[in-house]
Image (cartoon, rainbow, N blue to C red):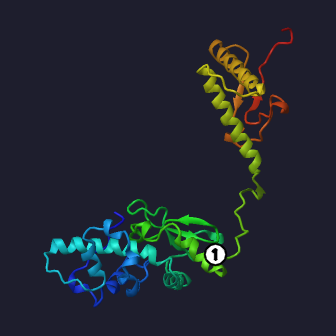
């Protein structure tokens, strides 16, 4: 999938294969590799084992291809040439000349702009999540928020991330430190009717609820929890007793009624029915059991 690009007929070729490749739709992320770099065999070390019909593909890229072959063979060589160009491109963009070309495209926002609101349309840079071909597609990196995004276009999303590598975007900002903007201090603050949501309280409620659920499952399996805090286990015992009491009252139709609601589900303030020392504020006891004074 990642090595597929739009194929064109011979009549659509310009005088140079590289010009045709760069101008093709979906290849806007690539820069043109200098011919001097392509003809230096040292720069291509090891690529002959990774590309089928390596020599024919290189001849096609450098515009010296003169093999008389059928259409099927030609298409195979063209596919290999596109793959070879991408592998060479990953090496070229970290050179001085390659960085300068990618810098020009970055300044023009050819790679897109950050979709995060508080980044204010900061330009993006293409990056790979792995240097191994055909593993993961290209992603876009924003230096302001230091996050990674998917390309908007499906054509760009099909480009192999190895054609840019995992180091290019970091090297770019090491070589050009003036490009690194100040970090955005703006953050979205959740509010309910104008009041800030207490993030730490919500986190504690979530942690306590998950811990209690885990302990309940471990007790059913008769597995030691390993927790030294007995308060939570005491709360679990109380919950089981209250559940049994509620079930007996419902079956017998007696005068005892015990109702427990999850206050977060109905939007009521959370009441601590068991005392604050337990730290259990996730369940609000709305109605306590009725017990005659003589008992």
**Horizontal and vertical percent for residue 203?**
72, 45
Percent of width and height locating residue 194: 77, 59
Residue 19 percent location from the top left of the image: 34, 86
Q: Quadrant of residue 135?
A: bottom left
Q: Residues within 10 Å of mark 1 (few under 14, many from 20)?
A: few
- The answer, for residue 226, to whether it is visible in the render is yes
Determine which residue is flagged by label 1: 120
- The residue at 34%/73% (across/down) is 84
Q: Which of these two is toward me, 251 or 280?
A: 280
The relative height of residue 52 versus residue 237 in the rendered view (above or below) is below
Q: Residue at x 32, y 74 (%)?
A: 82
Vertical placement of residue 215 versus 45, above or below: above
Q: Is residue 66 left or right of residue 21?
A: left
Circle 1: element type: loop
Q: Dividing the image into 4 quarters, which one contains the N terminus?
A: bottom left
Residue for point 19% across, 84% down: 66
Does residue 121 appear in this view?
no
């Amino acid at each position: 999938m990642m090595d597929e690009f739009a194929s064109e007929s011979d009549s659509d070729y310009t005088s140079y294969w590289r010009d045709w490749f760069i101008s093709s739709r979906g290849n806007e992320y690539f820069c043109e590799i200098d011919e001097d770099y392509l003809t230096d065999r040292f720069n291509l070390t090891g690529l002959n084992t990774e590309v089928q019909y390596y020599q024919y593909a290189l001849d096609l890229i450098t515009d010296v291809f003169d093999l008389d072959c059928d259409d099927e063979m030609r298409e195979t060589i063209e596919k290999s040439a596109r793959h070879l160009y991408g592998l060479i491109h990953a090496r070229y963009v970290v050179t001085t000349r390659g960085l300068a070309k990618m810098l020009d495209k970055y300044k023009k926002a050819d790679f897109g702009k950050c979709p995060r609101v508080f980044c204010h349309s900061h330009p993006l840079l293409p990056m790979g999540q792995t240097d191994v071909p055909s593993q993961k597609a290209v992603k876009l990196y924003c230096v302001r928020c230091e996050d990674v995004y998917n390309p908007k276009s499906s054509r760009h999303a099909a480009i192999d991330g190895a054609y840019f590598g995992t180091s290019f975007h970091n090297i770019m900002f090491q070589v050009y430190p003036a490009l690194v903007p100040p970090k955005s201090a703006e953050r979205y603050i959740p509010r309910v009717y104008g009041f800030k949501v207490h993030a730490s309280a919500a986190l504690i409620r979530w942690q306590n609820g998950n811990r209690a659920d885990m302990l309940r499952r471990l007790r059913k399996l008769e597995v030691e929890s390993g927790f030294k805090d007995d308060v939570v286990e005491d709360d679990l015992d109380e919950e089981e007793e209250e559940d049994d009491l509620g079930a007996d009252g419902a079956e017998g139709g007696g005068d005892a009624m015990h109702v427990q609601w999850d206050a977060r589900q109905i939007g009521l303030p959370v009441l601590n029915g068991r005392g604050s020392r337990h730290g259990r504020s996730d369940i609000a006891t709305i109605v306590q059991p009725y017990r005659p004074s003589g008992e």
